[in-house]
Image (cartoon, rainbow, N blue to C red):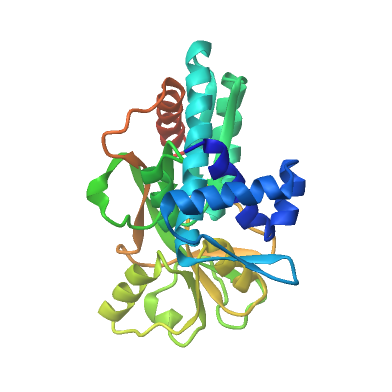
């Protein structure tokens, strides 16, 4: 099957109509329709349903599966092409990394910027996604490695290349009505009856620790990312319980307050698919990341 068919199908699905896709691709619509029919004949199933009169289309269940696979195949082909081209250039190339959206700013400032100063020919693909999508990216070859601060599903499928502990803390609006900060760590009982915003990855550990202390946390919001939990705190809708790094800065109206518990730590991990061989530039970056992490005292 011609790879162009996969690329064009992705464009069709994301454009919402054959007409819009044909305009984007610079291909006549009848030719694009023939490509879809050829795909449907090849896979012996209907992939698209064209809604008459409104020039819109819907993916069938099979079409949804094909779209996801086609998108991964196209991303993998692009990455392979770039990697093959990079082989002739020594320590240059493309780093493909998946990481939490909440980590991007700190990651770029503390790692990518100084690394790029040493290796200005390197280019980057950053995928800003939660941990469950990071895992998908690693296993499908979209990214070389990922950085997560939540437990990995099926950890036996991955190699942990670097790990360090990250503490959960409270972040509050300086004008919040619940906690008056006195430069002291908070005890878990002091969090009782306060609306808490926390992401899904941190919640199981936080809930378990609270219950062991005889406290049922009042969860106001469970969020996909740390960014959303901090937004709730910034708007004074609740307090955020989030992982933090020592060098991390927050908005001016937010305060960090430690929690007096020796159990509220998560492992922040840099990981790859088990057995996958990394490119020379990826290995170089990982060495740099380890050294930089140690120097930052994390």
Query: Measured from the top left, where is residue 198 in percent x and y?
Result: 48, 71
* Horizontal relation, residue 41 to residue 53: left or right: left
- Comparing 107 with 236, the one in front is 107
Image point (54%, 70%), residue name: 182
As drawn, the residue found furthest toward the left would be: 156
* Horizontal relation, residue 287 to residue 22: left or right: left
Whether residue 184 is visible here, answered yes or no, is no
| Quarter of the rendering occupied by the C terminus | top left
Asked if residue 264 is positioned above or below residue 178 in the image, the reply reads: above
Query: Measured from the top left, where is residue 219 in percent x and y?
Result: 46, 81
As drawn, the residue found furthest toward the bottom would be: 193
Q: Quadrant of residue 117?
A: top right
Asked if residue 272 is positioned above or below residue 260 in the image, the reply reads: above
Query: Measured from the top left, where is residue 293 in percent x and y?
Result: 44, 37
Whether residue 215 is visible here, answered yes or no, is yes
Image point (51%, 66%), residue name: 60
Query: Measured from the top left, where is residue 282 in percent x and y?
Result: 44, 27
Q: Quadrant of residue 173?
A: bottom right
Image point (31%, 33%), residue name: 276
* Horizontal relation, residue 80 to residue 265: left or right: right
Image point (51%, 36%), residue name: 2
* Horizontal relation, residue 289 to residue 119: left or right: left
- Comparing 150 with 143, the one in front is 143
Marker count (numbered): 0
């Amino acid at each position: 099957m011609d790879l162009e068919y996969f690329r064009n199908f992705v464009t069709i699905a994301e454009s919402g109509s054959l007409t819009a896709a044909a305009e984007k691709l610079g291909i006549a619509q009848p030719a694009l329709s023939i490509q879809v029919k050829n795909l449907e004949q090849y896979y012996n199933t209907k992939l698209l349903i064209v809604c008459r009169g409104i020039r819109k289309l819907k993916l069938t269940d099979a079409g949804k599966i094909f779209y996801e696979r086609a998108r991964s195949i196209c991303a993998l082909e692009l990455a392979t092409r770039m990697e093959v081209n990079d082989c002739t250039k020594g320590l240059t190339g493309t780093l493909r990394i998946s990481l939490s959206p909440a980590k991007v700013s700190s990651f770029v400032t503390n790692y990518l910027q100084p690394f790029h100063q040493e290796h200005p020919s390197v280019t980057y693909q950053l995928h800003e996604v939660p941990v469950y999508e990071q895992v998908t990216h690693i296993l499908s070859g979209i990214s070389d490695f990922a950085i997560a601060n939540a437990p990995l599903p099926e950890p036996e499928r991955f190699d942990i290349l670097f790990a360090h502990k990250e503490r959960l803390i409270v972040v509050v609006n300086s004008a919040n009505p619940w906690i008056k900060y006195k430069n002291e760590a908070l005890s878990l009982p002091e969090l009782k009856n306060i609306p808490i915003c926390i992401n899904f990855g941190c919640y199981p550990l936080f809930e378990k620790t609270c219950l062991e202390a005889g406290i049922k946390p009042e969860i106001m919001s469970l969020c996909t990312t740390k960014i959303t939990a901090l937004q709730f705190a910034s708007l004074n809708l609740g307090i955020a319980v989030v992982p933090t790094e020592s060098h991390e800065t927050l908005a001016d109206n937010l305060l960090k307050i430690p929690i007096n518990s020796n159990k509220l730590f998560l492992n922040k991990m840099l990981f790859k698919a088990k057995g996958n061989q990394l490119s020379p530039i990826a290995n170089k970056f990982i060495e740099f990341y380890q050294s930089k992490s140690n120097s930052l005292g994390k």
